Image (tube, rainbow, N blue to C red):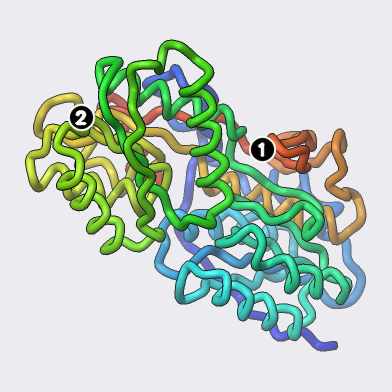
Amino acid sequence: MKKQIVSVLLTATMAAGLLAGCGGSSSEPAAASSAAAETAASSAAAETTGEAKTYALVTKSAGNPFMELLAQGFTEAVEGAGGQVVIQNPESATADAQISAINSLISQGVDSICVSANDANALSAVLQQAKDAGIQVLTTDSDVEASSRSVFVGPAGVDDVAVCLMDAILDISGGEGQYAILSATSQATNQNAWIDSMKALAESDEKYANLELVEVAYGDDEPQKSTDQTQALLQKYPDLKVICAPTTVGIAAAAKVLQDQGSSVKLTGLGLPSEMQAYIGTDDAHSCPYMYLWNNIDLGKLAGYASMALVDGSFTGAEGESLEAGDLGTVTVGTGLNGETVVNVGAPFRFDAENIAEWAELM
């Protein structure tokens, strides 16, 4: 079947690689990798006969900067190896919108589908249909049922994220008091995994004993709803000390609310430096002392390399397998909290007043 190709060209550039670790507070951005090196490292994936292979990425929703960076990295890896790219950006961050996009990709006859899931369970049936049609299926950023895909390409270990965020809450709160979590959707698998790990850590480690989680609110990765939820938290909990938003949309919305209102409540979480630069600082004029994230372009690249390797048969996503990922090096398939297969791009990195300006120019 002749494929209908949607070519997505993203022109921004990015320095590759973040220094791993939660403790580091500053770093020089790494030099940008050469396109030639990436192409050579993934030459095996580029060796196809006849028509070029087609690799699809389904993001969570349109207009999400975090997803745009993911798509950029995915495109760089695949097009650098001679593949064709299809990017589907659903109009809303819902399972139904993603199901519609995936059905379209099945009809187009793409060779692989990588999805950042809005719902862990609701996508299982349509992804199984894709597999039955001979399409390789994998996930990135947010996972689905393990039986519905070959491997999950993750941004960082779940527990690594949880430790960073809980330690930030502990530090910013002064070791005690109320905190709230502003999440994305209630079905987002990555958000829920991080939050569950945070809760488990808070219960098991005595150093968090004086912290009280008052609510997990959901902004559905929509700026206005995240703004409304932040305002509601401030009204409901006058003694609130910290809001933790492990979502780039949520943290940007909450940062603006807190800073515009001159609130004493402080913020941390996962955010894009370019969106959060105006809010990062340790004085009263800034709402967020520091936050974390990883290189989301690299995450997209890793998903692209995994997609190509699955299609060419050099990789199956089984535990213990190695994946050659161009300038990202060799990564090994491990297991997540529930025994699911996963390859991680790296640990969270801290962005603060000392390094936010240089990183804001990059992502």
Quadrant in which residue 158 is drawn: top right
Residue at 77% over, 38% down: 339
Instruction: From the top left corner, tell me how far across and down residue 119 is, in percent.
Output: 59, 61
Residue 152 image position (x, y, % from top left) = 71, 48
Question: Cα distance, mark 1 to mark 2?
Answer: 29 Å
Give how far across and how far down residue 75 sits, in percent: 61, 61
Q: Is residue 295 left or right of residue 86?
A: left
Could you say whether the residue bearing mark 1 is in a helix, strand or loop?
Answer: strand
Classify 257 as above or below 328: below
Q: Residue at x 52, y 22 (%)?
A: 21
- Towards the viewer: 122 or 19: 122
Question: Relative to 349, is 361 on the left or the right?
Answer: left
Q: Earlier in the sequence, mark 1 or mark 2?
A: 2
Q: Is residue 65 visible?
A: yes
Measured along the vertical axis of the image, is residue 97 above or below residue 30?
Answer: below
Crowd rating for badge 1 (residues with CA inside 10 Å; few <14, some 14–19, many 20+): many
Left or right of residue 165, residue 197 in this image:
right
* Residue 233, horizontal then vertical, whole percent: 23, 46
Q: Residue at x 14, y 37 (%)?
A: 238
User: Could you say which is closer to the camera, residue 50 or residue 124?
Assistant: 124
